[in-house]
Image (cartoon, rainbow, N blue to C red):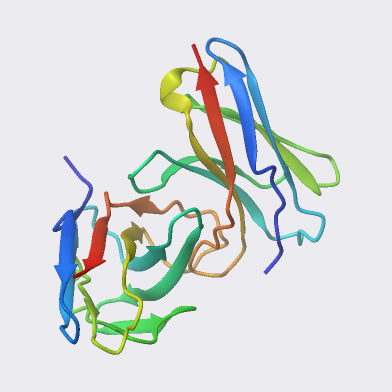
């Protein structure tokens, strides 16, 4: 089955610790995205990547880092600089990042990050 | 980016049609109207999108006003599994989706 997988489902972070969230897709999509969702709120864009070895900051990139070494993978690291990391993190992909705006985004099941 | 306005919540009974409204008075001519929904503790799921004409698919219908300043997502027969947050999103050339708070749909049996 084609789709997006995220792991782990739940992740616990200690103060001052960096943690990495995994996102893998087998849809052969060029574009991948990371969003953050706080309780009762919509999603906010952290980073996105239009192609391998390239990525752009979204609206709330501070305290996060990403890499895109392979087309299938777009891991997100939550660094110790992110002071309020507790949230639901969602990864998404689309065929391309350009076009006229009709592209559909496909979302993974999410990772819930909690601070100990 | 153009903004959308949706009611915070709506209620429906099972087997009845549901009309979810969305206002987007500042929509530009190139903005596509997208609808996604999010079930509890899951990632959003694409529902439907359109530009000018009404659209139908297996999940829902999208009715777009002639002036494109509003649209309505229509679920023809609501089921308990349709209870979710529904997001109306405008998208032009920007690469990512901009989510508001959406409409929380409750479905009663």
Left/right of residue B72 with respect to residue A60 in the rendered view:
right
Q: In this view, does A27 lie above or below B95?
A: above
**Residue A96, percent from left and from top:** 40, 64
Q: Which of A20 and B90 is in front in this view?
A: A20
Q: Which of A1 and B26 is in front in this view?
A: B26
At x 22% / y 81%, what residue is drawn?
A67
At x 18% / y 87%, what residue is drawn?
A16
Left/right of residue A84 with respect to residue B83 in the rendered view:
left
**Residue B109, percent from left and from top:** 49, 11
Q: Is residue B74 visible?
A: no
Q: Residue furthest bottom?
A: A81
Q: Which residue lies furthest to the front in this view?
A: A116
Pick the quarter of the image with the C terminus of chain A: bottom left
Q: Nearer the viewer, residue B21 or B84?
A: B84
At x 20% / y 72%, what residue is drawn?
A75
Left/right of residue B1 with respect to residue B35 in the rendered view:
right
Q: Residue furthest right?
A: B67
- Label tally: 0
At x 48% / y 66%, what residue is drawn?
B96
Quadrant of res A82? bottom left
Q: In this view, does A116 lie above or below A40?
A: below
């Amino acid at each position: 089955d084609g789709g997006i997988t995220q792991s782990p489902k739940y992740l616990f972070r200690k103060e001052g610790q960096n943690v990495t969230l995994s996102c893998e897709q087998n849809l052969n999509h060029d574009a991948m995205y990371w969003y953050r969702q706080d309780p009762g709120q919509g999603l906010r864009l952290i980073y996105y990547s239009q192609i391998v070895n390239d990525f752009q900051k979204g609206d709330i990139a501070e305290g996060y880092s990403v890499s895109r070494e392979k087309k299938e993978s777009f891991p997100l690291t939550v660094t110790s600089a992110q002071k309020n990391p507790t949230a639901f993190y969602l990864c998404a992909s689309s065929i391309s990042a350009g076009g006229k705006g009709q592209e559909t985004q496909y979302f993974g099941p999410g990772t819930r990050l909690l601070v100990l | 980016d153009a903004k959308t306005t949706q009611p915070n919540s709506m209620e429906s009974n099972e087997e009845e049609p549901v009309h979810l409204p969305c206002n987007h008075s500042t929509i530009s001519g190139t903005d596509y109207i997208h609808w996604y929904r999010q079930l509890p503790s899951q990632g959003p799921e694409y529902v439907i999108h359109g530009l000018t004409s009404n659209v139908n698919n297996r999940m829902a219908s999208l009715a777009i006003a002639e002036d494109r300043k509003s649209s309505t997502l229509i679920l023809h027969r609501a089921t308990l599994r349709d209870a979710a947050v529904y997001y109306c999103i405008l998208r032009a050339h920007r690469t990512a989706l901009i989510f508001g708070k959406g409409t929380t749909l409750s479905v009663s049996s």
